[in-house]
Every structure is written in C-alpha cells, then in structure tokens.
Image (cartoon, grey):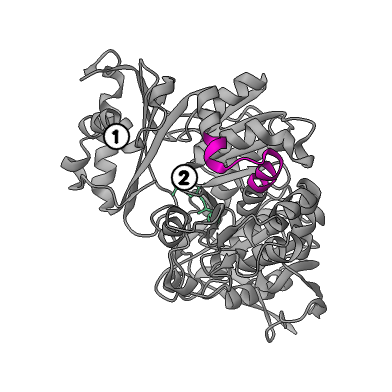
Amino acid sequence: MSIEIVSTAPIAGQKPGTSGLRKKTPVFMGPHYLENFVQAIFDVVGARGKTFVLGGDGRYFNDRAAQVILRMAAANGAARVIVGQGAILSTPAASHLIRLHGTDGGLILSASHNPGGPAEDFGLKFNMPNGGPAPEPVTEAIFGRTATLREYRILAAQDVDLTAIGRVAFGEMTVDVVDPVADYAALMEQLFDFPAIRAMFAAGFRMRFDAMCAVTGPYAREILETRLGAAPGTVINATPLPDFGGLHPDPNPVWAKALMDGMFGPDAPDFGAASDGDGDRNMVVGRGIYVAPSDSLAVLAANATLAPGYRAGLKGVARSMPTSAAVDRVAEALGIGCHEVPTGWKFFGNLLDAGKVTLCGEESFGTGSDHVREKDGLWAVLMWLNILAVRKESVADILTSHWSSFGRNYYSRHDFEAVDAAKADAMVTALRGILPDLAGQHLDDLTILSAGEFAYTDPVDGSVSQRQGVRILFTDGSRIVLRLSGTGTEGATLRLYVERYEADPNRLDLDPQLALAPVIQAAHSLARIKQYTGRSIPDVIT
Ligand code: VG1
Ligand code: CO
C-alpha cells in the first residue's frame, strides 16, 4: 500500500468551537475539507509511532470519515488505532478507552446534539491523552495549522473491515476493532451499586430511557436491560440511525417531548431519562416532575456517597459559569471547594487531573465525574438510579427535600437560534459598552450589584480565557448571563441564562418562568434583544 501526498490549497475557517469543529455535513464532505482538518490535528499533536482511539456517534458520514482518518493515520505513521466496531463510540466511552489503554489521544466523530443527515450537521473533535477535549492552546494551534498546510498524507488502500471485532493490519499500522460497549459497561459496574439497582427493578420499579435514535441505544440496552434487569422495552428509540430518525437528539423538554409527555401522563413510569447524539448529555425526569440540570448536579453532589465509587466523598465540585449556583450551596455545606469555569467540558480537565474536583456539571444537560474526562449521560442516569435504589424515595420527594434543605435556585435558559450573526454581534458589542455603568441601576424591584464579562484563569496552568459571557449580578442574588453559542452551524445562537434564589419554604414550587419573570424582563431591557435581533420569543426554553 503506498502513501499519497495530496497537494491542496489551505482551507480557511476550520476553527473548533465549544466542542470541536462543527459544520454542515456537505461542508465536511467537500473536497479536502475533512482531510485538511485531520492533517492539521496530526501535524500539531504528532502521529508517528502513536496510538489513537477512533469512533463516533454513527451519524451520516461517520463511517466514511472514519475510513479517511484511518488512511491518514496510517500514512502519518501512527502505530495503532483502537476503533469501536462499526466506527461507533459514545463520547464518554471514547474518553474511557483513551484512558484505559493510555493512548496518545482520540478522534471523535460527532456534532453531539445537533441533528444529523446529508443536509444536517457533522463534527470532529480531538481528545487528549487524559481523555478530555483538547484545551484552547491546542485547538488554536490546530486552527492555525488548517489555514497554512498545503498537503496531506493518505494511504492508497481499500476500507478497513470494521464490522468484526479483532486485529487487522493496515499498511504498517495496527487497527484494533473493539466492542464499543463492554469496557464502558464494566466501568459503570465498578462505580455503582448494581445489586441494589437490580433489586429495585426486580421489585417493580419502572423506567423509560429515550436514546433518541442516537449512540446510547446499545449502551443503555446492555446496561439497563441486560445487566440491571429493567423490563425489555425500557430503552426506546434504541437503534442508532444515520439521521437519528429525523429526531433532534438533544435531551431537553422541547426535543424529548414524547418522553416528557409520557412522564407527565397517566401510567407514567417511576423514572425517565434521555441522552444526546453522542451520549454525553442527560435529561432526568421523575413521575410528574422535571429535574433541571443545575438541580440534578446539586442533588448528585449531595448524595454522591451513596454510590460505591464515591463513598470516600468528593474532593470538590465544578460547574460552568452559566450553570446555577445550586451546587455551590451543597459544596458549602459539605465544606468542599467549588470552581466556576467557562462553558465547555475542556475547562474541567485540569481541575479533574489535578484532583481538585470529583463532580462537574453544566446547565446544558451535562454531568460527569473524574471517571472519564467528558460529561457522561448514562453515568448520570445510573447515579440517579443508585440514589433512588438506596433512598427508596421518589424523584419528586428527593427534589423537594433538597430544596427545603438548601433553598431553590430558580433557573432557565432561553435560546434564540439562527439569529443574523452581524446583528447578534452588534447586540453583544452594545451591551459590552454599557456594562461599566450598570452597577447601582434599578430595574423595577431589582438593583444591579455588578456587571462585567467573565474571564477565567485556569488555576492549574495559569492560561487565561477572555470574554466567556456577559454577567449581570443583582443585589438579591439574581443573575443574568448572556453569551453566543460556539456549537451552532447556522448564523448565531444567543443564549440567555436567568437565575433567582428563593429560600422561603412557601415559595419553592412556583413555575420557574413566573418566578423568573422580573429577571427575564430586565435582561430584555438591558440587552435590547428585540431591537437588535428582531426576536422577543425564544426558540427553546429549558
Ligand atoms: C453547548 C453547551 C455547552 C456544552 C457544549 C457541547 O455549547 O452550552 O454547555 O459544553 O454545547 O456539548 P454552546 O457554545 O453552544 O453554548 V455537546 O453534548 O453538544 O458536545
Ligand atoms: Co453531546
């Protein structure tokens, strides 16, 4: 098999966002586009003699992109690639394989919660030897390289057979095709009290897990139905499809509406959950009660020692800046550290590696721990099941007793999608301009305490990330955060996050949108969202 060196003009604009490079599938399938980005990765991290993990969420083009990456890895001198059978790996399973085999990193094919298909989205992300997403200095170097490289290396060879588990020689390189589920399932068995959860299912506990026709189907079936004895059919939409069956694999009350309806309808099961395209997000629902992700993180932190893997207690917790402060109150009560990082799981990596935190979470349905270096949807579901099995209480009872101990952080995120990018930028620029003068201003009953842009200095390596979101704090503890998404592929997505703390025991069961109404109104009047973007009603409210 010979190595071809293909000359190409540099491709501009291959800039990784919050979580890797994400573009419309036809863009990714365009001439040299994938190849240019992959060569840039190998040029920056080095491929010669190295071992990588490879897999993806099974969306359209996943299979062919994997073959291109294998050819390029071989042509760039990689020693070995560990690939999930059929080029499938959930993001947390890929992270685990990187760590388990001590590899030099991994390439994950996914656009996560974005829809998949010939006209939808595709993505590629490089993860480091610690199993976590490449940090900013690395993604910046990759971006820089994409704009200058003039040739890439690729093996002239037929496809590698990824249908059967086993070892194949590919040129000078070894390809190990592995079961995508087995090692991950074994890890979950170490962390959680499987006998207790099995006993709970055996006693009639009913659950529904919506895999949204994405990657977690096979994982959830094996773990929930086969190993834990949940009733057959517990996992719905369990077969991964290239277009996710036309679903939007984003586990939130809007896109997982069928699950929500079931959980609020007659004969609802005890527990419901859903995961996203690549299996790193989770939504958790009790019978008749939705668990907001920020609350879920707080409940998991407060109850973590009920799970065998966390019996020794938590070293600390961390959350993304826009995530509600519910977990901060738990950390305070436990006397452990609580860190606030910018949006994106890559920012948790150093804290986890340094042993400063055990649990992490984001408001965007992401929760995880130091067992891997990605957020992990099924992990969160199993943590909840472990807590339910030990406490023998309903989700609703656990949540309401949590609020009565800690108070409730009413919280919501409003997304304005596919906004004209220039208008969104103009809005943010204008808002930036007024920030220095906001402190002390009154808006109805609210008084602004401080306003500014969030900048983060990594406590481990000292790297600084500027402009990570506008933050306006009020004297009563309420908060507005505004930022532009880094994962969208169409125009700009404006995210508005609002929060208000309530300690009054008689006001713990309000409708969040009503409880937050004054803060939402303040956000609109300060940022002038309608004036700049023409939008006043969000596309998605979570
Ligand atoms: C979004 C979420 C962020 C998450 C990121 C990747 O980013 O807000 O919390 O880490 O998606 O998640 P943004 O920049 O669009 O707000 V995943 O599951 O899509 O890899
Ligand atoms: Co995801």
The magenta stretch spans residue 529: no
Q: Secondary structure at mark 1?
A: helix
User: Height in image: 491 above or below 312?
Assistant: below
Q: Secondary structure at mark 2?
A: strand
Q: Nearer the viewer, residue 17 or 279?
A: 279
Q: Which residues are magenta?
A: 383-399
Q: Nearer the viewer, residue 118 or 376?
A: 376
Residue at screen point 50% across, 53% down: 16
Please state the horizontal and vertical placement of residue 504, each as a whole percent of the image: 41, 19
Q: Which residue is mark 2?
A: 289
Mark closest to the chain's N terminus, 2 or 1: 2
Q: Which residue is mark 1?
A: 514
User: Height in image: 411 above or below 130?
Assistant: above
Left-right relation of 475 to 377: left
Please state the horizontal and vertical placement of residue 34, each as a whole percent of the image: 54, 69
Disc 2 marks which amino acid? Ile
Please state the horizontal and vertical placement of residue 494, each as a whole percent of the image: 33, 45
